[in-house]
């Protein structure tokens, strides 16, 4: 990097889990030279797990993340199913899917109303203190606030009923579930599911009437320079429908053609991980395509996961109301795959509706109330579990010794899959908006918006109390001296 | 009065699990009744704040970073009286900001009082299910402080 590069640091990023850091390097003309996305993390997790009981992993791994413990809990449980050669019986599998779809619904709801939605519902240039859930209800109506809280509560209540504990689920065990649900609980979930479907439809209505009518949003989804033609990864079932809990891993190329469709046990053969000197995170890429640097396209092994990717790899979404929304989405973009990074927001809401519909369908399934809850376990061994966390594909890989103790463990989390693409998206947005060294709150938010599309999760569940998460931006001149500091 | 005690932190991140440990100690010392619930959580601020809805009083037990190590702290929030005009919020954002946001959305369901009991620790650097030797007594002190809060509540003593 040249001596004349100026340095803009955004640290920590606001409105995401844990702490991340965006590094922008400006050239001597005040334009963008380069951009990086960094995740500081507590290292040594694999070493920490060695020698522990495999059966403890669903409780251990769900502590990694203060945002989506459900995803780690069931990725871990599915990995143990594979380690013990014990696929769960239908009742247990459907109970897991029920809880899992409630989590997906609730998580996507949170992103739209609290995290990503305010950027457009309130506006990217609005003051930061207005660009939040309160600004959203100011625009859409106070009544909405109660509905948001009510339906977040529904998601958590279903997780509590099926997961066996008020906050962190404990019901997933190797080969099945530790408990079923009562008829009274079934009826309670049924009522909540019906309401969730209606609320998801209403949310898509808000999206259509606000974001699809918003000039900034329309420009961002249409702008070619903000689209990334990458590979995409996600789970699909036997009919090619998107599935958050289970299925084959399907990967398509930038032109939409199938690159691979494999079972969980083969997915790690497709991925390689590389290290970069500026981050602790290992960056995955498609091994056979190869690493060509931070670039998109058919020749680059960079791929994306999450809602946009899942809608790009599936043939249909698998539930009727969401399918109609999916078709309207494809019509808007003239067909798939959709490369517009800002389309993540739309894809997320289609999935929110699909997840609510799945909860409604599963709770009406008679298998849920009758039959064995656990399969007999085989001898411990090696296994891979893949699940779709709200923000993308989550992979756990364990090897157990003959006593069932952990010999080896590796996790590839959703945000890690997306790190290369996030860096690219930040760079492209910064290139658009940072000119003449001018960096103000509105410009910084535009850069962060490119990053919030992915709903990245940097959680570490360590809290300051009472906490603060200020945004500090330092602008350095060519001599390295700080010229400007912006705080919020 | 319905009270919730939350042990907050990460039990696999060394001393960050201090609040969990303290909540477990409290749980072993009292009989949970209809009036007192005890939960533990590794969630971010918003989900913890959402958990408070419907209670009159909440006692949060947590490890804190950035104050004098192992010193006990006590802060009191009055959610229904808090300013909610410009509350930012995030998945793992500040608990205080999350409460402020919820106040605007559902003030009627927020507790009258949130007591934040903290024990300061050094920022965790490694994964560990154990507390450090110096943090073990702090967990006991934190639990004792929570029990004292409950006792004062039972005796009708106003807490300042």
Image: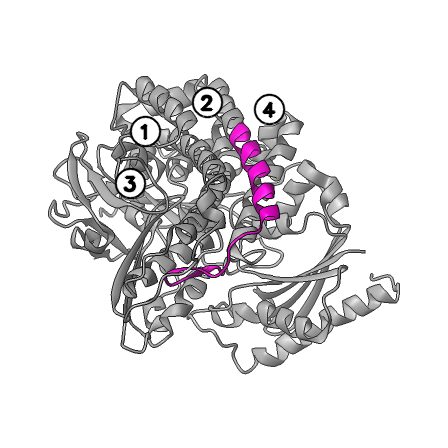
Asked which secondary structure carries label 2, the reply is helix
Residue at mark 4: chain? A
Question: In terms of sequence position, does the residue under pointer 1 or pointer 2 come before the other?
Answer: 2
Q: In front of the other: label 4 or label 1?
A: 4
User: Horizontal and vertical percent for residue A75?
Assistant: 36, 55
* Residue highlighted by disc 2: A211
Question: Is the C-beta separation of discs 3 and 1 under 8 Å?
Answer: no
Q: CA distance from mark 4 to mark 1?
A: 28 Å
| Farthest residue, direction right | B156
Q: CA distance from mark 1 to mark 2?
A: 21 Å
* Residue highlighted by disc 4: A139
* Residue highlighted by disc 1: A432
Which circle marks residue A237 in the picture? 3
User: Horizontal and vertical percent for residue B87?
Assistant: 62, 40
Q: How many marks?
A: 4
Question: In terms of sequence position, does the residue under pointer 2 or pointer 3 come before the other?
Answer: 2
Question: Is the C-beta separation of discs 2 and 3 under 8 Å?
Answer: no
Asked which secondary structure carries label 3, the reply is loop
Q: Classify B159 as above or below A260.
A: below
Q: Classify B122 as above or below A292.
A: below
Q: CA distance from mark 2 to mark 3?
A: 31 Å
Image quadrant occupied by the C terminus of chain A: top right
The magenta span reads A171-199
Question: In terms of sequence position, does the residue under pointer 4 or pointer 2 come before the other?
Answer: 4
Is residue B142 shown to the viewer in this render? Answer: no
Query: Would you say A84 lies left or right of A139 here?
Result: left
Residue at mark 2: chain? A
Packing grade of label 4 (10 A; few <14, some 14-19, many >=20) is some
- Residue under the image location 25 percent in, 33 percent down: A228
């Amino acid at each position: 990097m040249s001596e004349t590069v100026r340095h803009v640091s955004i640290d920590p990023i606001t409105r995401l889990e844990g702490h991340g850091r965006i590094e922008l390097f400006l050239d001597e003309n005040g334009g963008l030279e380069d951009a990086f996305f960094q995740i500081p993390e507590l290292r040594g997790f694999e070493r920490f797990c060695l020698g522990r009981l495999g059966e403890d992993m669903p409780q251990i791994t769900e502590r990694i993340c203060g945002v989506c413990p459900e995803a780690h809990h069931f990725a871990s449980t599915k990995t143990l199913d594979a380690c013990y050669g014990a696929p769960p019986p239908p009742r247990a599998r459907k109970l897991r899917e029920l809880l899992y779809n409630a989590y997906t619904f609730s998580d996507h709801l949170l992103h739209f109303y609290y995290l990503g939605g305010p950027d457009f519902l309130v506006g990217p240039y609005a003051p930061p203190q207005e660009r939040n859930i309160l600004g959203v209800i100011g625009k859409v109506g106070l009544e909405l606030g109660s509905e948001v809280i009510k339906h977040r509560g529904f998601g958590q209540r279903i997780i509590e009923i099926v997961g066996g504990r008020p906050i962190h689920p404990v019901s997933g065990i190797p080969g099945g579930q530790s408990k079923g649900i009562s008829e009274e609980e079934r009826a309670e979930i049924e009522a909540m599911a019906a309401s969730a479907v209606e609320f998801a439809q209403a949310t898509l209505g808000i999206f259509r009437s606000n974001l699809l009518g918003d000039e900034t949003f329309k420009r961002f989804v249409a702008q070619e320079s903000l689209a990334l033609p990458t590979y995409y990864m996600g789970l699909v079932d036997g009919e090619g429908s998107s599935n958050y809990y289970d299925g084959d891993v399907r990967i398509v190329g930038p032109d939409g053609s199938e690159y691979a469709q494999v079972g969980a046990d083969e997915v790690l053969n497709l991925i390689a991980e590389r290290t970069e000197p500026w981050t602790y995170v290992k960056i995955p890429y498609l091994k056979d395509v190869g690493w060509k640097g931070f670039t998109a396209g058919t020749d680059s092994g960079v791929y994306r996961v999450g809602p946009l990717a899942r809608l790009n790899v599936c043939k249909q979404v698998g539930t009727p109301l969401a399918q109609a929304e999916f078709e309207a989405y494809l019509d808007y973009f003239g067909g798939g795959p959709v490369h517009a990074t800002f389309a993540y927001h739309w894809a997320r809401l289609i999935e929110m509706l699909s997840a609510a519909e799945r909860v409604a369908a599963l709770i009406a399934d008679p298998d849920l109330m009758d039959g064995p809850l656990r399969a007999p376990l085989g001898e411990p061994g090696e296994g891979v579990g893949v699940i779709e966390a709200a923000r993308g594909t989550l992979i756990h890989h364990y090897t157990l010794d003959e006593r069932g103790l952990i010999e080896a463990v590796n996790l590839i989390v959703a945000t890690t899959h997306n790190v290369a693409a996030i860096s690219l998206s930040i760079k492209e947005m910064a290139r658009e908006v940072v000119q003449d060294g001018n960096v103000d709150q509105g410009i910084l938010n535009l850069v962060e918006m490119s990053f919030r599309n992915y709903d990245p999760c940097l959680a570490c569940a360590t809290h300051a109390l009472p906490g603060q998460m200020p945004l500090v931006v330092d602008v350095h001149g060519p001599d390295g001296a700080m010229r400007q500091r912006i705080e919020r | 009065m319905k009270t919730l005690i939350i042990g907050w932190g990460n039990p696999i991140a060394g001393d960050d699990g201090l609040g969990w440990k303290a909540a477990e100690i409290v749980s072993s010392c009292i009989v949970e009744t209809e009036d007192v619930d005890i939960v533990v959580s590794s969630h971010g601020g918003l989900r913890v704040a959402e958990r408070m809805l419907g209670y009159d009083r909440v006692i949060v037990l947590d490890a804190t970073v950035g104050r004098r190590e192992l010193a006990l702290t006590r802060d009191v929030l009055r959610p229904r009286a808090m300013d909610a005009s410009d509350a930012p919020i995030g998945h793992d954002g500040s608990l205080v900001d999350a409460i402020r946001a919820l106040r605007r959305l559902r003030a009627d369901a927020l507790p009258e009082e949130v007591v934040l009991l903290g024990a300061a620790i050094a920022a965790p650097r490694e994964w560990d299910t154990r507390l450090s030797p110096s943090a073990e007594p702090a967990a006991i002190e934190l639990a004792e402080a929570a029990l004292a809060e409950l006792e004062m509540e039972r005796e009708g003593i106003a807490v300042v």
